[in-house]
Image: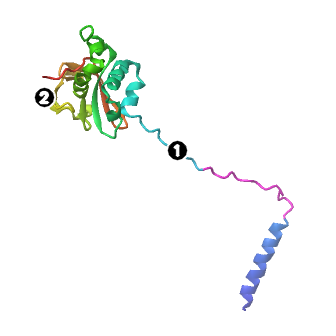
Amino acid sequence: MNRKTLTLGLTAATCLALVGCDSSSNDTAIALPTPTPTLSPSPTPLPNIVAVAAANPNFSTLVTALQAAGLVGALQQEGPFTVFAPTNAAFAALPPGTVEALLRPENRAELVRILTYHVVPGLAPSSALRSGQQVTTLQGSPVTVTLLEGGRIRINNANVITADIQAANGIIHVIDTVLIPPR
């Protein structure tokens, strides 16, 4: 071993020994905090169309009608669906006694016909709707889209008062009139 290497090695060892014996060092160890991994909360899954409607008091008549028609299970399926959802006020605007009559078991077929006229298979967000567009409903007849001034949307004679309510299995557009399918 050459002398220069031996001298460097001894010098380094001496320096380390002196640093270890330094009287100004503090025997208290400083504990560094261990970083806690930040877990972002899992996004809350969106409820399905029926659950969204059931959670909104403005849709209580619609939910009652869906139950009477036996359509709740269908609208809880994967979809996707677009629902033009009439409010309670829309149902109340029908001629007196109409809602009560439709809810009777003997009128279930007519209720199904009306309610399925409010449902479109697939997603139809407001941004995809075009004036004059015919959109075929689950009932089989199309509804007509009209775009009005100010970005407002009309489906047949019903105004969309709130568009694009997201659900796990589709989209809800709130309308102010019950849609009646052609015979």
The image quadrant where one finds the N terminus is bottom right
Quickly name the residue at label 2: 132
Residue in the picture at 26% in, 20% down: 106
Image coords of residue 24 (percent x, y):
84, 58
State the image quarter where residue 155 is shown: top left
Amino acid on which the number 2 mark rests in the picture: Gly
**Residue 25 counted in the magenta span:** yes
Residue 65 highlighted magenta (yes or no) = no
Secondary element under disc 2, as helix, strand or loop, is loop
Q: Is residue 106 above or below residue 125?
A: above
Q: Position of residue 70 (x, y in %)?
A: 32, 28
Left or right, 23 with respect to 98, comes to: right
Label 1 crowd (10 A; few <14 / some 14-19 / many >=20): few
Q: Are marks 1 and 2 in contact (CB under 8 Å)?
A: no
In this view, the residue in front, 153 or 90, is 90
Q: Which mark is residue 40?
A: 1
Q: Residue flagged by tag 1: what amino acid is it?
A: Ser
In the visual, does 132 lie left or right of 7?
left
Asked if 170 appears above or below 33 in the picture, the reply is: above
Height in image: 114 above or below 17? above
Residue 10, percent from left and from top: 78, 81
Classify residue 125 by image quadrant: top left
Q: Which mark is residue 95?
A: none
Sooner in the amino-acid sequence: mark 1 or mark 2: 1
Q: Tell me where residue 111 appears, x and y as whole percent.
A: 25, 22
Q: Main secondary structure of the magenta part?
A: loop
